[in-house]
Structures are given as structure tokens and as C-alpha cells.
Image (cartoon, grey):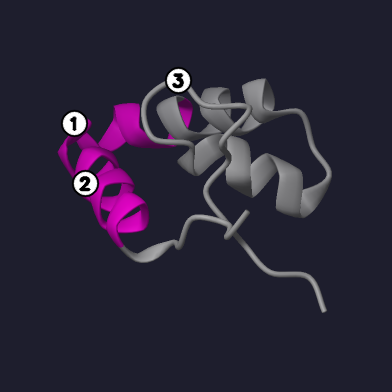
Amino acid sequence: MKRLFLSDTDKKISGVCGGIGEYLGIDSTLIRLAWVLLSIPTGGFPGLIAYIIAAAIIPREAT
């Protein structure tokens, strides 16, 4: 079963978008771009809060 983890190899800040990209099999740049484009109409604050929550609840992969 596939699980979502923070990325240790493809990260800019905490690895949220890289982990989502690895989970979905999509380039993480597209995930980052979509995150920014969806955050702009809301003023950015909800997107920032969602990123912080995701970074806090998505586990790191045990190596």
C-alpha cells in the first residue's frame, strides 16, 4: 500500500510538495505551482496555514 511521506530528497522548505509529487507520480514543480496558484485568490494565508498543517501531520519516512 502506498503511503504519503515528506520528501527527504525533493524539498525546498519541508518536503510537503515533494512528498505529494512522489505519492502521485507527478513532478513536484507542478505541485508547487498549483499550490501557489490556488493560494493567490485566497490571499495566500489559507495556503500557508494548510502548508504548515501538512508539514506537521505528514510523517517523515523511516530510513
Q: Residues within 10 Å of mark 3 (few under 14, many from 20)?
A: few
Select label 2 or label 3 by which is in front: 3
Which label was assigned to residue 12? Answer: 3
Instruction: Give, as a three-letter code, the residue at label 3.
Output: Lys
For label 1, the residue is 43
**Which residue is at the front of the view, 57 or 34?**
57
Counting from the top left corner in percent of width and height, residue 30 is at 67, 26
For the point 29% across and 41% down, which residue is it? 47
Which label was assigned to residue 46? Answer: 2
Magenta stretch: give its range.
37-56
Instruction: Give, as a three-letter code, the residue at label 1.
Output: Gly
Q: Which numbered disc flags the more N-terminal residue, 3 or 1?
A: 3
For the point 34% across and 65% down, which residue is it? 57
Q: Secondary structure at mark 2?
A: helix
Select label 1 or label 2 by which is in front: 2
Q: Main secondary structure of the magenta part?
A: helix
Q: Is residue 34 above or below residue 20?
A: above
Q: Secondary structure at mark 3?
A: loop
For the point 58% across and 40% down, which residue is it? 7
The quadrant of the rendering that contains the N terminus is bottom right
Q: CA distance from mark 2 to mark 3?
A: 19 Å
The quadrant of the rendering that contains the C terminus is bottom right
Counting from the top left corner in percent of width and height, residue 23 is at 73, 53
Which label was assigned to residue 52? Answer: none
Q: Image quadrant of residue 4?
A: bottom right
Q: CA distance from mark 3 to mark 1?
A: 22 Å
Q: Is residue 29 above or below residue 60?
A: above
Q: Residues within 10 Å of mark 1 (few under 14, many from 20)?
A: few
